[in-house]
Amino acid sequence: MLTFIAYGLAVVLNLFIIFIGLRFLLAPEASAAGYGVPARADGDAKAYLTIKGLRDLTYGIAGLALLAFVGATAEAWFMLAVAIVPLFDTVIVLRNGGTKATAFGIHFATAVAVLANAALLFAV
C-alpha cells in the first residue's frame, strides 16, 4: 500500500507541475496572477513567465522519467532537490507583495507535499 501511495503521489505531483508549466506557456498573465505575483502590464514579463513555464514543464517530465526508468530512490532524491523551488517561490511571493495565503497556502504547502513524497519514496 505504501508503494502505491508513494508512486501515486509522485505521479500526481509531476503531472501537476507539467500542467502548471503548460499553463505558464499558454496563459502567462493569468498564471502569474495565480502564482501570487501578477505580471506588470508595462513590463517585459512575458519572457520570464515563459522561462518559468519551461522550467516547471521540464521538472515534471524529468520526475516522471526518473520514476519510470530509474525508480523510487532516484525520484526521492529528485523530489528532495526540487522542493527548493516551492520553498523559494514562497519567499518570492512574500517579497513581491503577494498574500501570505498564496505564499503559504500554495507554495509552502507544495514544498511540504513534495518533501513528504520524498520521504515516502525513500521508505519504499
Image: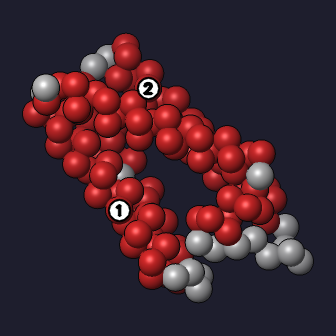
Residue lying farthest to the top in this orientation: 69
Residue 42 to residue 27: above or below: below
Say which mark, if any, is on residue 64. Answer: 2
Q: Secondary structure at mark 2?
A: helix
Of tags 2 and 1, the one toward the viewer is 1
Q: Secondary structure at mark 1?
A: helix
Q: Amino acid at mark 2?
A: Leu
User: At which x and y percent is residue 7?
Assistant: 28, 27
Q: Is residue 46 left or right of residue 19?
A: right
Image point 35% across, 62% down: which residue? 109
Q: Amino acid at mark 1?
A: Ala
Query: Toward which corner of the image does residue 76 lie, by quadrant?
Result: top left
Camera sees residue 111: yes
User: At which x and y percent is residue 95?
Assistant: 53, 83
Residue lying farthest to the left in this orientation: 123
Residue 76 to residue 91: above or below: above
Query: Toward which corner of the image does residue 79 lie, by quadrant?
Result: top left
User: At which x and y percent is residue 78?
Assistant: 34, 37
Q: Is residue 38 left or right of residue 78?
A: right
Query: Toward which corner of the image does residue 68 lie, by quadrant?
Result: top left
Dot 2 alpha-carbon crowd within 10 angstroms: few under 14, some 14 to 19, many 20 or more: many
In the depicted view, which residue is nearer to us: 84 or 37? 37
Image point 73% across, 61% down: which residue? 30
Camera sees residue 59: no
Distance CA(mark 2)–CA(mark 1)? 21 Å
The first of marks 2 and 1 along the sequence is 2
Dot 1 alpha-carbon crowd within 10 angstroms: few under 14, some 14 to 19, many 20 or more: some
Locate the N terminus by quadrant: top left
In the rendered image, which residue does mark 1 sit on?
109
Image point 68% across, 64% down: which residue? 32
